[in-house]
Amino acid sequence: MQGIIIKNISNDYVVESNEKQYTCKARGKFKKDKIIPLVGDKCIFDEEKKYIIELLPRSTELVRPPVANINQAFIITSAKEPDYSSNLLDKLLCIIEYNNITPVICFTKLDLLNEEEKQKIEETISYYKKIGYKVFKNTEIEEIKKSFKEKITVFTGQSGAGKSTLLNKLNPSLNLKTNEISQALGRGKHTTRHVELIEMYGGLIADTPGFSSISFIGMKDEDIRDNFIEFNEYREFCEYKDCMHISETDCEIKRQLGKNILDSRYENYLKFIKRWKMLSVSILGIKEKIKKNIKKLDNLNIDFFHIDIMDGIFVENTTWEYKEIKKIVKHRKTKKDIHLMVKDVKKYIDDFINLKPEIITFHYEATDNHIELINYIKRHNIKAGISIKPNTEVEKIKELLNMVDLVLVMSVEPGKGGQKYIDNSTNKINELYNIRKENNYKYLIEVDGGINKETKEYAKNADILVVGSYITNNNYEEKIKEFKGL
């Protein structure tokens, strides 16, 4: 039978067909072939054995939130608590446009604004409408309802923006759980824990887990440029056909600033092109008052804590035991990026899965059981990374690249801090970037060692930059802002 996957919880897939629902497992072949069914996938399934047999071709696919065959994306944008972020809105618009999905903007919490703030938001709404986007306020319920017919719609946006609240307004019988904004963090708590398609007003709507960080994985600088849609109206008047609208002197986009192009849009574009790398701060270089300094970093603009674990065998030095790390970082909100420089990889994985990190990375050179360990990490809903030393060529890990979530290129010899960036690392980063592009792989590229304000330019095709002493030996906030160009 043919159906559509409408829910996924712990690898149980709810398939809807002919107004009936079936809870199915995916065939073992999917796991072997590294195929992951997504909510929104059309599929062939066995209604008696309750197995998904085949996934039909996808028209669209989002990585985060993980949904397929989406027609339109409602970007739920808070005007207050959390405060309106043009940067986040423009990121989402750019990425959604790139994925050939129609974006729709919906502003929430307008009732919390004072008169001056309302005027600014109204001007913002007018601009986005003028350049071609459909924009709603969350009070325009009847108009919003009409937009769902015969479409699969995803709701997305930052945590606390009001996705579940709006869905409850659209259909009170859903009674979806919501939460107040954390006053300390200025952002919402995640309340939706899985992706589910809900039948509503002639279409299907996905309520998805909120998120507070996104990236342009797989997108070239030219893709970011081309998906700022208003630029395309004026770019033919630039002197150069391939104008990037940055340093060129005869650029029509820059001439239109303050006239037909919003300054904040252009400023965000520059940030995305030049400085969108994710930042993983290595805590190895923090020499004193570790808990206090970790807490300080936790409230700054970083994406990960990079936690190097050394056993004195695979590398000469040793670092913290699991119990020490747990005391330091367990209750911190920043995601954990665990880098195992150890020989007994399985033992350390067993320890650190208890921290529920975002990523656990082990070294290719430390083991022969790469596939087994990758699958073991993933079974715990943790991203699996593979790392290579400076003398290990990319060719050695080619057969693993369709399995891993991350590749960590060591741009110094592992085991010591404060080393200089090894020039050949750039070639490896670029090689991994090209392989990913050619094969449509999904892994992130991370680089670790000797990264500072100057050398980060050598790693422009990496997604995550690990920075240690350049930040931890200085004024944290100042150096992070300088590094990210904020």
Image (cartoon, rainbow, N blue to C red):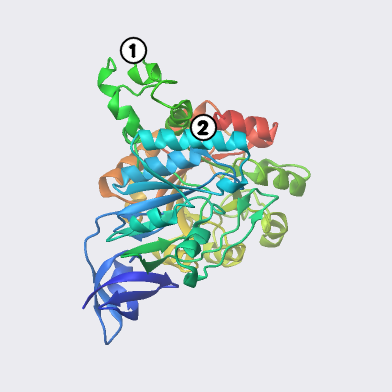
Is residue 351 visible in the rendered image? The answer is yes
- Residue type at mark 2 is Tyr
Residue at the right extreme?
289
Q: Is residue 103 left or right of residue 337?
A: left
Is residue 27 visible in the rendered image? The answer is no
| Residue in the image at 34% along x and 30% along y | 230
Of marks 2 and 1, the one in the foreground: 1
Q: CA distance from mark 2 to mark 1?
A: 37 Å
Tag 1 or tag 2, which sits nearer the N-term?
A: 1
Q: Disc 2 designates what residue?
A: 421
Q: Is residue 263 left or right of residue 229?
A: right
Q: Secondary structure at mark 2?
A: loop
| Relative image position of residue 65 (x, y in whole percent) | 42, 56
Q: Is residue 152 left or right of residue 110?
A: left
| Residue in the image at 30% along x and 60% along y | 149
| Relative image position of residue 225 (x, y in whole percent) | 35, 31
| Relative image position of residue 153 (x, y in whole percent) | 35, 58
The one nearer the camera, 391 or 141, is 141
| Residue 250: mark | 1
Quadrant where the C terminus sits is top right
| Relative image position of residue 56 (x, y in whole percent) | 22, 65
- Residue type at mark 1 is Asp
Q: Secondary structure at mark 1?
A: loop
